[in-house]
Image (spheres, rainbow, N blue to C red):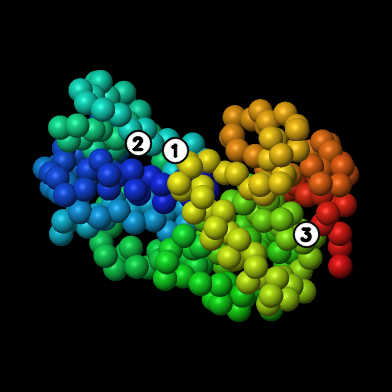
Amino acid sequence: MPEGHTIHRLAEDYLHRFAGRSTRVSSPQGKFADSAALLDGRVLDAADAHGKHLFLGFEDTGWVHIHLGLFGKLGFGRTPAPPPADTVRLRVLNEDHYADLRGPTTCTLITEPEKQAIHDRLGPDPLRPTDGPDRAWARISRSRTTIAALLMDQKIIAGVGNVYRAEVLFRHGIDPYRAGRDLTPRQWDAIWHDLVDLMREGVRNNRIDTVRPEHTPEAMGRAPRVDDHGGEVYVYRRANMPCHICASEIRTAPMAARNLFWCPGCQIPS
């Protein structure tokens, strides 16, 4: 499932290609056909992201709420657009660009109050300028749940996925099994601001890189990471490999329905 930086990048991509211009909107698959007919010919005038939720605003008609889920894909291209595949749930098209959405968990036309209700149930997002660490800390600081599980709870903090969870805990030397209430305010503040920086970088580069300059392949004289997800990381998907810092074997275990990765040498239980 895409992490929050990808959704914010997609919002920027929509704005760059379609904002302020009338668009053709269709649903070749048919599941969004009635709503597409309402939007066809209207101007896309806003795009918003909160965590893993994407919202496209069309004048006074409402918002298209998109959640890609595990299998959703969004692809952009230049015109002339090819004939859409039958699997395309939503196509947005203008004279220069097209965007095809396939296989999302959610693609629904909603009202402004319905959009606000989604925001209200989500935790703060490190990539939303108006959000900060305090609301998440109020819940984390009282919780017996592990910090690794709390970071994946979108009602507590929105947009963090399996990669950012593993990597930010490594970067701060925090045992993923530590209870939320055992973190200090200073540790949480550092985690939050690190997520802000890392995820902003993810939006800019459209990939996740979490290693510090002194730990890049060039600085350490090691081979670059070879992985479909790309990006240089410390522990994510590096199970049984040596830690870049202490050479301990990276471990993995299931947690919150995903595989957790951590270094027992650098993330020592307190």
| Nearer-N-terminus badge (3/2) | 2
State the CA–CA distance, disc 2 to disc 1: 7 Å
Residue in the image at 34% along x and 68% along y:
116
Relative to 160, is 83 on the left or the right?
left
Can residue 4 be seen in this snapshot? no
Res 173 label: 3
Can residue 266 be seen in this snapshot? yes
Residue 227 vs 190, above or below: the answer is above
Between 109 and 231, the one nearer to me in the picture: 231
Q: Which residue is mark 2?
A: 101
- The amino acid pointed to by label 2 is Leu
Q: Which element type, helix, strand or loop, lies under badge 3?
A: loop
Q: Which residue is mark 1?
A: 72
Residue in the image at 87% along x and 42% along y:
247
| Nearer-N-terminus badge (2/1) | 1
Q: Which element type, helix, strand or loop, lies under badge 1?
A: loop
| Disc 2 crowd, CA 10 A, few/some/many (<14, 14-19, 20+) | many
Which quadrant would residue 87 be assigned to in this image?
top left
